[in-house]
Image (tube, grey):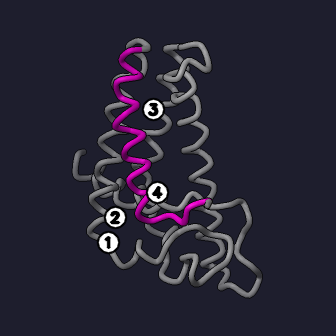
Amino acid sequence: MKTLALSAGIAFTAAALALTSTATAESHVDPAIAGAIKARQAQMQLYAHNLGILGGMAQGKMDYDADAASAAASNLAALVQLNQSTYWPQGSDNASVEGTKALPAIWEDMAGVMEKGGAMVDAAIAMEAAAGNGLESLQGAMQALGGACGGCHQSYRQSNN
């Protein structure tokens, strides 16, 4: 299970690295690449939705609800373990295609991507175990989860600046 989770996490990390705009690649882009970008953008929206629930509770912006926290954490844990290998074809970076924030560094530093993916899987699984056990437990797991997300974004995603 840990090996499967780590492999899935590798693909997840690549996805987490490039939370992209909702704009899709222009029509002159290979349809397979445009489809892959759309798929990873959809995946990022699902991450953001579930992270928003967990983060809102952790920050006190919404009431803690053990069932909702557990559901969001379970969704996130399942999402990070999906096989996303087809979302990241060569030539789908922001230097090659408009409409993505994925930096070419993803394909240049696969060892780093894999490491960060493993950290994300571990953090999501830890959040799944913690989320329903009280607000303090959720808050304790949030730091590692946020760090795993941010680690990928800092290295492999075009900033919004």
Give the amino acid type for the residue marked by disc 4 in the picture: His
Badge 2: few (under 14), some or many (20 or more) residues near its Cα, within 10 Å? many
Residue at the spot 29% in from the left edge and 65% down from the top edge: 112
Give the amino acid type for the residue marked by disc 3 in the picture: Ser
Q: Earlier in the sequence, mark 3 or mark 1?
A: 3
Which residue position is annotated with label 1?
Answer: 110
Observer-nearest residue: 102 or 9? 102
Residue 74 is tagged as 3
Q: Residue furthest front?
A: 161
Residue at the spot 58% in from the left edge and 29% down from the top edge: 53
Give the amino acid type for the residue marked by disc 2 in the picture: Val
Quadrant of the rendering where the N terminus is positioned: top left
In the rendered view, tell whether residue 113 sits above or below residue 44. Answer: below
What span is colored magenta in the figure? 136-160
Is label 1 in contact with label 2 (beta carbons under 8 Å)? yes
From the image, state whether disc 3 or disc 4 is nearer to you: 4
Observer-nearest residue: 20 or 155? 155
Residue 153 is tagged as 4
Give the amino acid type for the residue marked by disc 1 in the picture: Met
Q: Position of residue 159 (x, y in %)?
A: 56, 61
Badge 4: few (under 14), some or many (20 or more) residues near its Cα, within 10 Å? many
Which residue position is annotated with label 2?
Answer: 113
Taking the magenta stretch, the answer to whether it contains residue 152 is yes
Q: Earlier in the sequence, mark 3 or mark 4?
A: 3
What is the distance, in whole Å, between disc 2 and disc 4 at their CAs? Answer: 11 Å
SS at badge 4: helix
* Quarter holding residue 74: top left
* Quarter holding residue 27: bottom right
What is the distance, in whole Å, between disc 3 and disc 4 at their CAs? Answer: 22 Å
